[in-house]
Amino acid sequence: MKPPKIAIIGCGNIGSKLDENKDLSYALSHAGAYQKMGQDISFLVDIDKDRLLTAAKTRGVQTTYTSYDELFNNEEIDILSICSSTNLREAIFIRALESKIPVIICEKPIASNYDEAIKIKSLVENSSSTCILNYSRRWDEDVQQIKKIIASGELGKMTSAQITYGKGILNNASHALNLLDFFIESEKDINFVQRINDDRIDFDAAYNVMMTYRSPDNQFPVILKATDHRNFTLWEIDLLFSKGRITFENSGLTKKIYNVVDSPVFEGYRILNLDLELSDGYLPCMENMITESLQIFNKQKKSSRSSISDALQSMTLIEKIKNYNNEY
């Protein structure tokens, strides 16, 4: 089987830099994951010549460009990773789809605003390309196991969800909102929005939000609690059920599942008991995503765990939150 020609646009942290010259058992970047999967990278693109030269030398890539237009004008590509700055993604998508690239992987968010995202979705759906959005936790096998636990009903119905995050509702809260959509389908009502005053106030601000999630057989509150990322980094999810609890801690690396038991101390009281702790699923996520892209390219798999439609669900909700904030 002929190996794919792979291109990466953007050689910053997620494109290559995070795991350059590091002896890790897992990959933190697209370039690192391709190489962990035994794939050669054919082309690298970055406007920063020094960054491009360093990435190319580290990754052993001979062909480089400082312009994505030059890449598309000169090369045939089978798998493309878009790791550029967000404001360039619409233009890159248009060129990539015109070039009929079979598999396109894009970092989140897919675009700098909702209108651009809707346009990209329409273009992808009317093309022959498969688009994968890197909401990384979709490739976390712990998350897959948790989804099965929730679907089994052993924890009962979800009664509330709280998300704690910082550094932007698109940049970080979207991961948690994307996970909620993965776990449970529901309509959403926005009840309260308050923007916090961090240094990103005019660029992907963070918001405190109260919402109601509704499905035909359930209704529960969802709270987004924003923190100022300049103080510390925090990303956590707390899901309460009628018969248990699931938490995502340590930036989502640790997941804990609790069931309900009788209190050994206070007669008549029911308490939560740690039943299962999972912590092995997240670090292989990047490699799992790249493996999936190779499977799709080789026609061993038809669709992605994280499609453009999946990504647009959380982005649509975020757009509603922003509009609510502007209106009220």
Image (cartoon, rainbow, N blue to C red):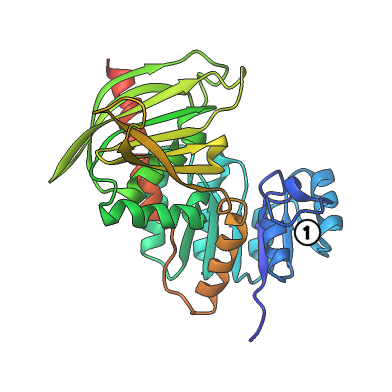
User: Is 27 left, or right, of 238 in this rendering?
Assistant: right
Instruction: Between residue 49 and residue 274, name the one nearer to us.
Output: 274
Q: Residue at x 55, y 67 (%)?
A: 293
Residue 201, horizontal then vertical, whole percent: 50, 18
Residue 265 visible in the shown view:
yes
Count of numbered marks: 1
Relative to 97, residue 167 above or below: above
Tell me: 155 left or right of 291.
left
Residue type highlighted by circle 1: Thr
Q: Residues within 10 Å of mark 1 (few under 14, many from 20)?
A: many
Asked whether residue 306 appears in the rendered view, the answer is no
Foreground pick, 130 / 119: 130
Q: Which residue is mark 1?
A: 64
Is 188 on the left-hand or right-hand side of 62? left
Place of residue 204 in the rendered image (x, y in percent of width and height, measured from the top left): 49, 28
In the image, taking residue 23 as reference, residue 99 lies left or right, namely left
Name the spot of residue 96 as percent of width and height, x first: 54, 61
Identity of the residue drawn at 31% across and 25% down: 266
- The picture quadrant where one finds residue 128 is bottom left
Tell me which corner region of the image, top left, top right, bottom left or bottom right, holds residue 254. top right
- Give the quadrant of the C terminus: top left
Q: Secondary structure at mark 1?
A: strand
Identity of the residue furthest to the left in this view = 216
